[in-house]
Image (cartoon, helix red, strand yellow):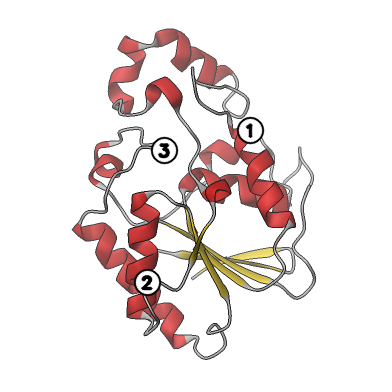
Amino acid sequence: MTSGATATVSLKPGLTLYLIRHGETDWNREARYQGQRDIPLNETGRAQARRHGEILRSLMPSIAEFDFVSSPLERTVETMRIIRAAAGLDPEGFRLVPDLSELSYGHWEGELAAELPAKDPEGVAGKAADPYGWRPHGGESYRDLEVRTSNWLRGLSKNTIAVSHGGVSRVARGALLGIDRHIVPFLEVPQDKILKLADGRMQWI
């Protein structure tokens, strides 16, 4: 754990969660805020998803009975279908979970990060002053996102493979591992690795 915060959620004993960020999109490459906009994967993102599926296939049969769930957004659904196909599973054999949707960026969605200091200096200053608690107009803060992500984590009752988003991965680690909330918004979320969470520890695969 990191000083400055405490774990607020714990997985049930013996449970394993594989948390996967969707593959790359063109908006990721451009550093454009996506939030809850529906943006498809690009070819790099599809290759990343296939890589995840091949890794999960190597863990068979132990993961065959896992619960597979996804955010309902297009880029996560596409990632999950590719993962399951590459793992030799029915591409449609998963559930959609709205609580796994990305942080809503409200009026920032569709904007290039590089252009926001000129377009919305007040918002940029507010986010810099309180990265965890700042909320864009019509959107959510990381604090808001942690509430709904934690509700989902508390309800897990079986081993799970979830495809979600960068924000969800960050707040899940904050809640489960007690990471200082001031740094949660800046945690690394690679799109070419799988995050394994179990027994109060994390591992990138």
Q: Are marks 2 and 3 in contact (CB under 8 Å)?
A: no
Write the residue at 39% across / 71% down.
92
- The image's mark for residue 83 is 2
Real-space Cα separation, disc 2 to disc 3, in angstroms: 21 Å
Q: CA distance from mark 1 to mark 2?
A: 29 Å
Whether residue 62 appears in this view of the structure is yes
- Quadrant of residue 154 in the image? bottom right
Could you classify mark 3 by the number of other residues whose Cα lies within 10 Å: few (under 14), some (14-19), or many (20 or more)? some
**Dot placed on the residue nearer the N-terminal end, 1 or 3:** 3
Left or right of 36 on screen, residue 143: right
Which residue is label 1 attached to? 144
Of the numbered discs 1 and 2, the one sitting upstream in the chain is 2
**Are there few (<14), some (14-19), or many (20+) residues within 10 Å of tag 2?**
many
Q: Is residue 80 above or below residue 169?
A: below
What residue sits right under mark 3 in the picture? 36
- Amino acid carrying label 1: it is Asp
Q: In the structure shown, which secondary structural element does the residue marked by tag 3 occupy? A: loop
Q: Amino acid at mark 2?
A: Ile
Q: Nearer the viewer, residue 162 or 191?
A: 162
Mark 1 neighbour density, 10 Å: few (under 14) some (14–19) many (20 or more): some
- Please state if 159 lies on the left or on the right of 163 as rendered: right
> x, y (%) of residue 186?
52, 39
